[in-house]
Image (cartoon, helix red, strand yellow):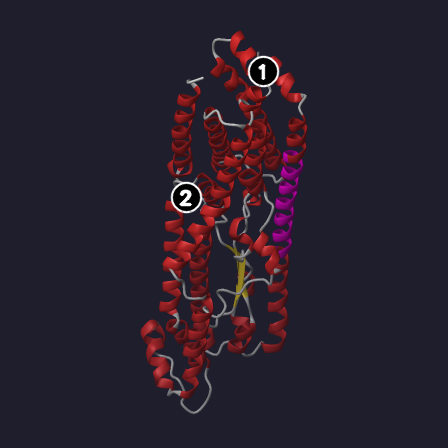
Amino acid sequence: MYRLLFKSFFRTKIFLVGLILLMTVGVIGILIGKQYLVKQEKTISAAQEFQEESIKRNINYHKDDLGLLLYYLRFTLIKKPANISAISIGQSDVNPLMQAVTIRGLEGQKYDTDFENPSLLMSGNLDLSFVIIYLFPLVLIAMTFNLYSEEKELGTWRILASQTAKRANFLLKKLVVRILFVFTVLIVLLFMASAILDIPMNQNFWALFLQSLLYITFWSVLCLWMISLQKKSSFNALALISIWVVLTILIPAMVNSYVINKYQVPEALHAMVEQRDGYHEKWDLEKDVTMTGFYEAYPQYKNYQVPQDKFSWIWYYGMQHMGDLAAKETSAQMTEKIMLRNNLSEKFALFVPTMHAQLSFNTLAGTDMISHINFLKALTEFHENLRLGFYTKIFDNKTADAVNWQEHEAKYYAINRDFNWFYIILPTLMVTLVIGVFGMWNLQKL
């Protein structure tokens, strides 16, 4: 039976169209991911070379004044993307993967990013995760919406019914043939991505692999449930497309709107302005006002005297740090509300497989918002270590020769891509099982 069903399916136009469409767009998605990795590698390499050349060039101009030298020098922290991130680029197209900062105030530098075309950011990247989440369900719908209704509308259902006592099994076999085709294409694309993008087959890859299979299984049982209602082809097609629109576009947009309005995040610009105001106002105040706050934060520098009648670097960098302290509360509020947004979105996604699949892909690839927040926290620590490492030398009026510049090459931030297997697998599995039970129960009525 299966052999005949496969032969019959392979002769249909929808098989050829589906195969060409999925493979073509899937390969394009993989190549876009490859292009993304190449771009990031070039950017990282350029940043490393620039930092090295910048240090050498500025030392030639400001060798005797370390405070002035470090006013200009930038030090780079890099969050090198894992190769699996090419499958799900996520928010990496808007959140920078590296930051080059001076030892001056951090809040004014923390949210610097590359200029991008807004229209390209709005449309997003056609990576493989986009193909899996949006295109695969459409092809599956096109292949399965009329499995039962077509037989009935063509008048062949009565003939088939008279030749078999298990009519539901016949429909299931037809459905399985089409589902196996879609699964085969999906598996081929995932292994192609692993080979082309050089993705190690670690637990993150296998979790993404399993989540992809579960996601397509969800749409398969959804199509089964719709077929089991025994409606006309036009009704099935309209209903399934409507469900696709609701799950992939309408509900995510509604959740996004609700989350944004519930947790209104102060713009990063506010923190930047507060930092600059907190710094610039110190020029008009007595130096003791600045230094009192600075000494409270860093009591180890209390022995350094600040001349009242002339400029000093301890006062200047003290002002810079006090500017950061002025913006600290706003920055913390912004981070907290972003986390609340993310947590609320994840709770909604537990009941919406499309949202859950996208968030899971981003989590596994390390391109989610949590990963970026952790990077910003690491940047704050990186900046703190830089300042404390240079302050003593600056305040002691050392020259550039007092610093081992070989130690100050671009640093890498190690991404933590740990995940919870239950969170990744269980929500989609539970929704799939519930819909599958209803579909099979309805199908038995045949």
Q: Secondary structure at mark 2?
A: helix
Q: Nearer the viewer, residue 88 or 132?
A: 132
Local crowd at mark 2 within 10 Å, few (<14), some, or many (≥20)? many
Residue at image location 59% in from the left, 36% down from the top: 194
Q: Secondary structure at mark 1?
A: loop
Residue at which label 2 appears: 349
| Residue 71 visible (yes or no) | yes
State the predominant SS element of the stretch in magenta. Answer: helix
The magenta region covers: 22-44
Residue at image location 50% in from the left, 19% down from the top: 172
Q: Position of residue 168 (x, y in %)?
A: 47, 16
Q: Amino acid at mark 2?
A: Ala
Above/below status of 77 relative to 33? below
Above/below status of 89 relative to 326? above
Query: Image quarter for residue 12?
Result: top right
Q: Position of residue 134 (x, y in %)?
A: 55, 40
Residue at which label 1 appears: 156
Is 341 contained in the magenta span?
no
Residue at image location 42% in from the left, 18% down from the top: 445
Q: Amino acid at mark 1?
A: Thr
